[in-house]
Image (spheres, rainbow, N blue to C red):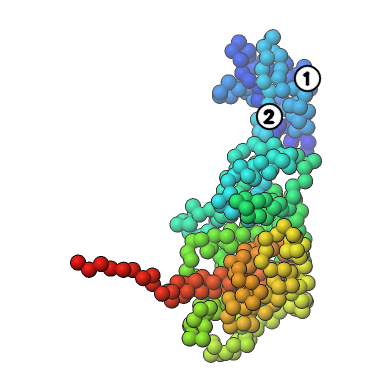
Amino acid sequence: MSSQINDFPTMEQAIIVTAVDGLQLKDYVSAIVEIVELKNIFVSRLANNRVCICLCSLVLVDEFVIKYSQLSINDLIVGVRRLINPVRRIILSNVCPSIPHDVFINQIKTLGFNIVSPMSFLKARLEGENYAHIRSFRRQIFVQPNDDIELPASLIIKYDNTPYRIFYCYDNVCFKCRQAGHLASECEKASNSHETTELSVNFPSGMRPGDGNHPVSEVSVEDNLTTSSSINGEPTASGSKRQVTSSSDNSPDVMEGPLDFSQKSLGEDRQPKKLRSSDSLESLTPIPELLAPAKELIEDSGSPFPLNFDNIAEIMQNIFETTDPIEYVQRFTNDVEGVIQMLYEIYPTLTKKSIKNRCLKVQRKLKKAHSLYLELTNATSPPSNISHSTA
């Protein structure tokens, strides 16, 4: 088995030596074999004045490039480097688009990383060719691997006198078990625990398992959350909304989120889906207990959240029982947009799928209700007095 691996070296086993006029391939190989064993070596001249030499193992390449950045061949000094430099990609989430790249680049340098690429925006990955160009509140940058540096889960930065909590992770870290080396779709730990059992929980109106609205990975959830409201301020056509009445002109209710079986407005009784065993256990778990993983983030003195832990737990518990979600939230704070952003920021810290789904539903309900509330407010505002001169 080992001989087969050595017979077919990978690209990571290759080094590049600068090609110099007057030197032949034999001269480069002779200089190399004075340092390493003459075994399974491949050599070829490449374009742009380069000579590629493949060695028998990756360990040998690591040792070689560390000790020798230059070689002396026939009294000529030539440079030596890897063909492929190993890099790691860092993903930044919850990043306001108005903040320049330099703010985060300097922060990453402060952690001790050597940056090897510019920072760039990540796309929102929305379905449809018309939305392919839309970018998300996430960015990426490539750095040299350094196991001695521990990448923090989140950091707070201040820009334009406003604090922001930015989340950091490597691209190969599973968001379900928080372990590196595999993706969420390949996570055995999460799938063995409750990967499929949560799918029987009641879904929002017009939303089914497998459609674009259901979170299947952390990337898609964050991107859709961050960009869905920026495409169109109007509520989506798929979501049905209650007819505005005279008693709720300023803050109408929007039918978004879990179905409210206590209401008979649909004209028929709906039988709740039968929960599986793990769903039943989580349905009996109090909301504050399910929210516990986010408590440290919420109570962080540097977090610019409009609500404390008890307030947000009470809202998530009772908001679907109210007829006016905006009025209900305003009992605790007038910053409705801040509550929506708060739900987005605590979402990655939650571990149970039932509370993660509830967090998404509450946020969608508030976003649609708040958007409609603003439209009605603007429509009912008296026009400004404009004086007209007569000829």
Instruction: Tally the marks.
Output: 2
Question: Whole-Å distance between the Cαs marked 1 and 2?
Answer: 16 Å
- Do we see residue 246 in this rendering? yes
Sequence-wise, the earlier of marks 1 and 2 is 1
> What mark, if any, has residue 35 been given in the picture?
1
x, y percentage for residue 97? Answer: 56, 52
Q: Which residue is rendered at x = 47% and y = 64% of the image?
A: 232
| Residue type (three-letter) at the residue carrying disc 1 | Ile
- Residue 203 placement (x, y as % from top left): 61, 75
Quadrant the N terminus occupies: top right
Please provide percent x and percent y for residue 18: 63, 20
In front: 333, or 170?
333
| Disc 2 packing (10 Å; few <14; some 14–19; many ≥20) | many
Relative height, residue 343 to residue 32 (above, below) = below
Q: At label 2, which amino acid type do we have? A: Arg
In the image, 66: left or right of 381? right
Provide residue 102's location: percent of width, then percent of height: 61, 42
Q: Residue at x 58, y 73 (%)?
A: 365
Which residue lies at the image location 73% right of the left edge and 53% below the top edge? 153
Kindly state the secondary structure of the residue where label 2 is placed: strand
Callout 1: 10 Å neighbours few (<14), some, many (20+)? few
* Mark carried by residue 82: 2
Q: Are marks 1 and 2 in contact (CB under 8 Å)?
A: no
Image quadrant containing the C terminus: bottom left
